[in-house]
Structure formats: C-alpha cells, structure tokens
Image (tube, grey):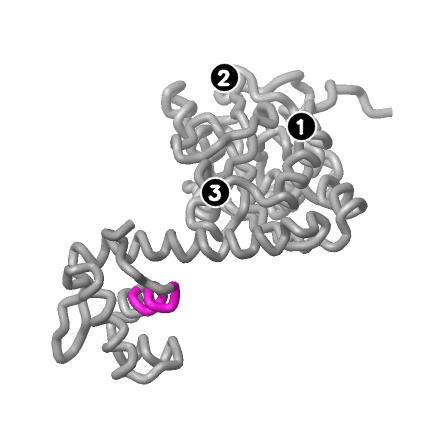
Amino acid sequence: MATLPDLRSRELQAICTLAECGSFVAAALTMNVSQPALTRTVQRVEKALGVALFHRSTRRVETTAAGQEFVTLAQRVLADLRISVENMREISDELRGRNIVSAVMSVAYTQLPRIVARYRESRPGIELQVREGVHGTVMDDVRSGVADMGITYIDDVPNEFSVVSLGREAFHVVMPRNHPLSARAGVTLEALAPYAQVSLPREAQTRRLIDSHAAIAGVPLRHTVTVSQFATVMQFVWAGVGVAIVPGGAVPAALSADLVARPLTRPALSQAIGVVFLKDRGLTPSANGFLAQLRSDWVQVVAPARSRRR
C-alpha cells in the first residue's frame, strides 16, 4: 500500500482532460479552474508518480508514452468509480436506478420493446436507456462503461467479457409478396445474385458474415442500396427497391410490413446472440433483474412456413 500514489478523482480527471484538450488553457476552461491551479495539479500528480506525463511547448501539450498509459488507467478508474457509486446508491433499493443497455438493431427494433414493457411492470421506478447500433458499437459501449450490458452476437467475444447466451438467429431473405423468389421454400445465395439488395453498412456484423460466405461461394451480391436501420430496410423492400438478408430477429418486423420471409439456404447461416458485460465490473442489482427478464421473455424467432394466400 505504501507504494500507491495518493491521488484524488479530481486529479485523475484533470490529467484526462489535459490529455484530451492538448492545452492548459482549454483544459482549465473545460474544468472551470484557473490555469495556475491546473498546472499545480498536474505537477503534483507527476511528482506522486515520479514520471513526466506531458511534454510542454509554447504551442501545445503532448502526452508522453507514460502519460498515455496513465490516462488509459485513469479513465478506467474514473469509469469504475462512477459505476460503483451508482451501484451503492441502487443497492438500497433495487426498484430504483438506471440501466443502460446497448443492443444490435435487430434486437432493439423487435424483441426489446416487449421485454422492456414487461420489465417496467414490476420496476416502474427504474430508468432504462437503450442505445442501438452495430455489433462493434455495442462492444465499445460495454467496454468503455457507457452501457451496463450489451445484447449482440457472441460467436467471437474477447475474454474480458462475461457472456450469457440467448440462442441463435438464422438468416432469412425478406421480399415483397409478388417477388419471383417468394414461391420458394428457401432461397440460396446463388438465387439472390440477379436481384438488387437492400443492405446494412459494411461495418455491420451481419453484413460482414453474409459477404464473406458469398465470397467463399463465388456469388457476387448486388448491394444496390445501403441503409443503417432495420426499419428503413423493411420500407425499402416493401417499396420494391430490392430484397434483403436479415437475421431471424428482424423477421417479425418484415411480416408486420406485409413482406414474406424465406430461410437462407446453401449456406444456411446463423449466429449466436446473447448478453455481454465486463467480468471485472459485474452487474448492478437492477441490471441483474433486467437480465433475468431478458432470459425469461426471449423468443427464438422462426419464420412461418410458406402458405398459400386465400
């Protein structure tokens, strides 16, 4: 313990702010302190650590190699401190607090609203904030402490995360009812090649998985239109712009838009989906309650068999 430096959270914040701003003037304004006070704080931290954290020049302040390492540590400590303080405040009453959930779009758009509604029936005092994005965004949200947990694809998750599986999502092709492929029980990648596709961005996990298997099969897919939301995908397909390959979680949205869904075959693609959170942080009591609700109410989506309309 004697080797640990005696540093306060305000001092850690000062180092992080200066590293971000690159200027004593800008950092002092950001923290609402005087420049001399900020200078003294930085000097005290450097003396306590025994290393220089910044290179000073007349124009700009640059972070040293040791400074970069310390800033990363300080950011993590501050994030953990914020989470711990919030956790202690929530432990006294699990029915109060705030949960931040980051989810891939197919979940945020389909299953999550129903599950959140059930959760709030028993915990109306808890504020829920939902962030939606692609797989990489969800992982970054959880890793940085912005989100308590993430709901995303878990086939390849780093060891720093705890993982709770919710099941697997098979891919389906959605299209208008009068599309030539709608008469088939399943659709292959090869059959899709002549048709325009409405696709998610290249950085989306589902898009990367589809493109890689198409490349292996030697099938050129026609990504005619790229959009960033599943709701937009369905509207473009409904308008006749093209077909779309979507994970099973998005199938109910397709059916509600009066589209049809057919399983993607040869290859029959699927991906595991689940909940991730950092091992060394755990979950708050209210977040654990939300996880229990997720596991209880999660529905494995299966596209209905093809039927003849009357």
Quarter of the image for the C terminus: give it.
top right
Q: Give 205 or 62, whichever is nearer the viewer.
A: 62
Disc 3 to disc 2, how far (Cα)? 39 Å
Q: What residue is drawn where x is 36% and y is 81%?
A: 33
Would you name the residue on which mark 3 appears? 281
Would you name the residue on which mark 2 appears? 267
Disc 1 to disc 2, how far (Cα)? 16 Å
Does the segment drawn in magenta span residue 150? no
Query: What label does residue 261 carry, if any?
Result: 1
Determine whether, in the image, residue 279 is placed left or right of residue 63.
Answer: right
Residue 3 pos. (x, y %): 23, 52
Name the residue furthest front: 2
Amino acid type assigned to the residue bearing label 3 in the image: Arg
**Element marked by disc 1:** strand
Q: Give 21 or 153, whichever is nearer the viewer.
A: 21
Determine whether, in the image, residue 91 is placed left or right of residue 36.
Answer: right
Query: Which residues are the magenta region?
Result: 9-15
Residue 213 pos. (x, y %): 42, 23
Q: Nearer the viewer, mark 3 or mark 1?
A: 3
Q: Nearer the viewer, mark 3 or mark 2?
A: 3
Count of labels in the image: 3
**Element marked by disc 3:** loop
